[in-house]
Amino acid sequence: MDKQPQAVGQITADQLHITADTIDRITELAHAAVCTQKADGITFALVPEKYKREDLTDAIEKAQPAPNRKKGTVALTSIDSFLQYIADQNQAANAYIYADPEKQTLTAVFNENKENAIGWRDHRATFKAELSREFANWMHHNKQSKNQEDFAIFLEDNIADIVEPSGEVLLSVATSLQAKTEAAFSSAKRLDNGQVQFMYTENIDARAAGGSLEIPREFALGIRIFKNGDGYKVKARLKYRLHSQQLKFWYELDRPENVIETAFKESIEKAQSSGYTVLFGSP
């Protein structure tokens, strides 16, 4: 069968890679529009009764090999991936990066409103600095009072994070605390060497025996603050309470909020060195 000639301006289903039904619907709606009128910057189409307006923009765009423009949000989990992505977009002249230290987030808006340019602001990349598993654990147990045995178990389970004093020293402290759970503690005093000495008595072979236990007043963690991030030194103070001859222990991290702020500041500085303008706030 001979191929029918195609009228100038006529669209075929093969050309747009969409169904013939869609082409028929587009043609039907096009024929329905009798004329257009403009009033106060608004364009109206006058169509016969029983017809309704349909937005075909998405249907036509999805039938194309590629979208008309970039849009969407990409969530990155490392600062290096974030920097790589914004470098690939090459939109420093049209974008802002918003830094929010309180939420530890960076948000790049590539089609921004800058100077005389007007953008849709819907093409973005985000980076959220999430606490590492180990630092989140120390934060969770911060300032939580524990009995001797529970505190000793906690030290044993997390000894790899402690750098000062050495892990061997803290492991010895944990072992001693477990061994003296039945002892009756009577007093505590601070020593010049930076430790606390606890005096106790315990029954050994039906005899009362006295002794002392020394533990450090401070220790330090060597730990990543954020996932995929660098390690930091975080100081902690060991606290205790002696009540009814029993000891309770807890620790207090030294201003952990400042450590988090310092760690995230490095991410901000890396973003600033990327060539993009960094603003403090939320997009």
Image: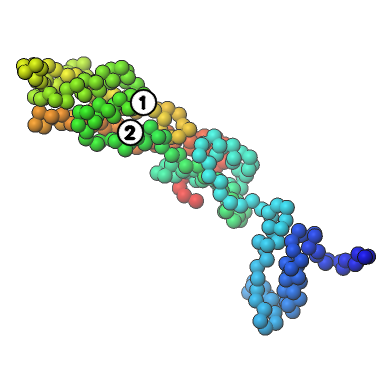
Q: Residue furthest right?
A: 2
Identify the residue position indicated by label 2 in the image: 138
* The furthest residue to the left: 207
| Secondary structure category for the residue under label 2 | helix
Q: Position of residue 31 (x, y in %)?
A: 76, 76
Measuring 73% from the left and 77% from the top, which residue is drawn there? Answer: 32
Residue type, label 1 = Asp
At 83% from the left edge and 67% from the top edge, which residue is drawn?
10
Rounded to the nearest angstrom, the CA distance separating label 1 from label 2 is 9 Å
Is residue 256 rendered to the left or right of residue 83?
left
**Which amino acid does the dot numbered 2 rest on?**
Trp
Determine whether the residue tagged by mark 1 lies in a helix, strand or loop: helix
Colour convention = rainbow
Q: Residue at x 65, y 76 (%)?
A: 52
Estimate how packed mark 2 is, as few (under 14), some (14 to 19) or many (20 or more) residues with alpha carbons within 10 Å. some
Which numbered marker is on residue 161?
1
Instruction: Find residue 77 and report its horizontal and vertical position in percent.
Output: 50, 39
Residue in view at x 42 percent, y 27 percent: 231
Q: Quadrant of residue 40?
A: bottom right
Dot 1 and dot 2 residues touching (CB under 8 Å) = yes
**Would you say residue 263 is visible in this rendering?**
yes
Residue 113 showing in the rendered view: no
Image-based side of 104 in relation to 117, left or right? left
How many other residues sit within 10 Å of disc 1, few (<14), some (14-19) or many (≥20)?
some
State which quadrant residue 8 falls in: bottom right
Above or below, comparing residue 122 to residue 50 in the picture = above
Q: Residue furthest front?
A: 205
Counting from the top left corner in percent of width and height, residue 124 is at: 56, 48
Q: Name which of mark 1 and mark 2 comes first in the sequence.
A: 2
